[in-house]
Amino acid sequence: MQFKIFQIPASGSDEIEDEMNQFLRSHRIVSTRSELVNDDHHSFWCFCIEYIDGKLIEKSDRREPPKDYKEELSEKEFSVFVHLRDLRKQIAEQEAVAAFILWTNKQMCEMVKNRCITKADLKKIDRFGESKVEKYGDRILEILKSAFEVENEASRTVDGTDSGTRQPSFSVD
């Protein structure tokens, strides 16, 4: 961590204010502290800025280009992804929040690719914590289990043959 101190006369100084504002815009700020200092002859604001050295990440640099999950997932996986997306939209409307607040497309993709069928599996998804698992897990798992338990049963047969001829309870188009 590093510190930068600015002293601005109480009467104001456009030049110093501009310098401080430019500094704030161009650095990763951790904290700020300000104090009005009065001595017998002068009054001034003292600002202590704590910052992390390094380039500020521009907004345009932060965003990854949107992914086409239809290309990243198999046809069946994408069908499950669509069902999860529909569920997310429904819950978001009920709770009057933006859909991405509930869980992201990336998290849905991980749920599908990892074949999550338990709450423990969901907890392994990055940034999908205990509270989300408790609040939404049962509804999410209903979709995932319906799609993937058939596969899991087929892989668990005693003789190793594919017994997974049962269809999921939702339509996999």
Image (spheres, rainbow, N blue to C red):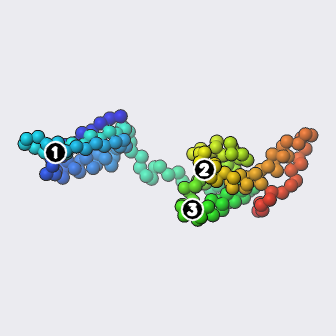
Return the residue at label 1. 44
Q: Say which label, 2 or 1, has the lower sequence index.
A: 1
Rendering coords of residue 143 (x, y %): 73, 55
Mark seen at residue 95: 3
Q: Say which label, 3 or 1, has the lower sequence index.
A: 1
Mark 1 nearby-residue class (10 Å; few <14, some 14–19, many ≥20): some
Q: Quadrant of residue 102?
A: bottom right
> Which residue lies at the image location 24% right of the left edge and 47% below the top edge?
19
Mark 3: amino acid = Glu
> Which residue lies at the image location 42% right of the left edge and 46% below the top edge?
57
In this rendering, which labeled residue sits more in front, label 3 or label 1?
3
Query: Viewer-proximal residue, 131 or 164?
Result: 131
Rendering coords of residue 11 (x, y %): 13, 51
Mark 2: amino acid = Lys
Residue 154 visible in the snapshot: yes
Mark 3 nearby-residue class (10 Å; few <14, some 14–19, many ≥20): few
Return the residue at label 2. 132
Horizontal side, residue 61 vs residue 96: left or right: left
Mark seen at residue 11: none
**SS for dot 2:** helix
Numbered label tally: 3
Direction right: furthest residue: 159
Q: Quadrant of residue 96?
A: bottom right
